[in-house]
Image (spheres, rainbow, N blue to C red):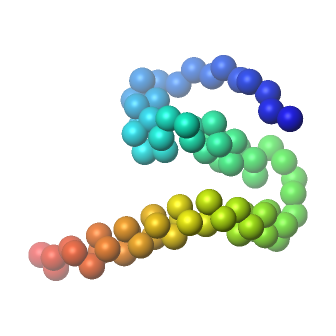
Amino acid sequence: MSKKLTITVDDDIYAGLHSVIGRRRISRFLNDLARPHVLTHDLAAGYRAMAADREREEEASEWIENLTGDVANESGA
């Protein structure tokens, strides 16, 4: 079950969340960010659950591939 929560953030934080995370993903991002701080779950079980989330794994893989592409394109100067 989900609960609706209204929070207040600075304008620049909201703009950053909107541009980096995406409009339809902010709630999930904040939920995932808060989870380890407010729930006492087994760490291994948490990692298994994250690994089972195919969409999350695909996004992480895409992010990593883009990051390594950026590093490969950097000049040594």
**Residue 43 on image: x %, y %:** 81, 66
Displayed quadrant of residue 6: top right
Give whichever of 60, 43 is nearer the camera. 60
**Residue 64 on image: x %, y %:** 45, 70
Q: Residue at x 71, y 23 (%)?
A: 5
* Left or right of residue 64: residue 46: right
Query: Is residue 13 in view from this perspective?
Result: no
* Left or right of residue 34: residue 17: left
Q: Residue at x 75, y 52 (%)?
A: 36
Displayed quadrant of residue 69: bottom left
Specify the quadrant that holds the C terminus: bottom left
Q: Residue at x 56, y 66 (%)?
A: 58
Displayed quadrant of residue 52: bottom right
Rendered view: 44 above or below 41: below
Query: Is residue 11 in view from this perspective?
Result: yes
**Residue 54 on image: x %, y %:** 66, 65
Q: Residue at x 75, y 47 (%)?
A: 35
**Residue 30 on image: x %, y %:** 63, 40
* Left or right of residue 75: residue 12: right
Specify the quadrant that holds the N terminus: top right
Q: How many marks?
A: 0
Rendered view: 32 above or below 13: below
